[in-house]
Amino acid sequence: MDTILISITSTLTTTVLISGLLYLCRNWLLERLKASIRHEYNIKLENYKSDISRREKAALIAELVAEWTHPRESTKRLNQLLWELSLYLPSAFVKDLNATISKEADCKPINDVLVNIRDYLLDGKDPIEPHQIRHFKDPNNPDMISNNGIRK
């Protein structure tokens, strides 16, 4: 009788321990899976936010160049855009942009400046040549830049 009682107790104890261990392993695996999925989505979210930020910055640069190339009644918006870009672009790009907009003697053509900034915003992953950026010359604005990015 003692042997049967010991055998039943041993079997129940083993069953409870194995069930508990399986329960813990199952929960651990589920939590690891949830954490892995959460991490993956967090990375995708950060990439998406970065992409949106990059597009917003590119839009500001495009707006600045458009403001600069067309006649205007006030320089308020042009200054605002230039100053805003000066707050986050690396200093080399700010210097090039300022030199080009100020029409300094040895300034880079605007297409070169745009390509350099584009390369920076896209982490060098999307190279494009300056001659591939087009401008439509305004017939009413003789100061507007031509297709090669140089004022004529």
Image (tube, rainbow, N blue to C red):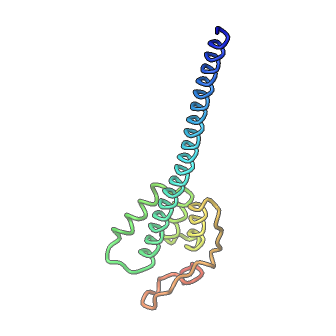
Q: Quadrant of residue 132?
A: bottom right
Point 64% across, 61% down: residue: 124
- Do we see residue 34 in this rendering? yes
Count of labels in the image: 0
List x then y, in percent, for residue 136.
Answer: 51, 85
Using the rendered view, name the quadrant where residue 85 is placed. Answer: bottom left
Left or right placement of residue 18 versus residue 46 in this view:
right
* Image spot of residue 58 (x, y percent): 49, 66
In the image, 65 versus 102, the foreground residue is: 65
Q: Residue at x 52, y 81 (%)?
A: 145
Q: Tell me the residue at 54%/54% (across/down).
A: 44
| Figure check: 42 above or below 84 | above
Q: Nearer the viewer, residue 48 or 147?
A: 48
Q: Is residue 107 visible?
A: no
- Image quadrant for the N terminus? top right
Image side of residue 118 versus residue 55, left or right: right
Q: Which is nearer the eye, 78 or 129?
A: 129
**Image location (x, y in percent) of residue 131:** 63, 79
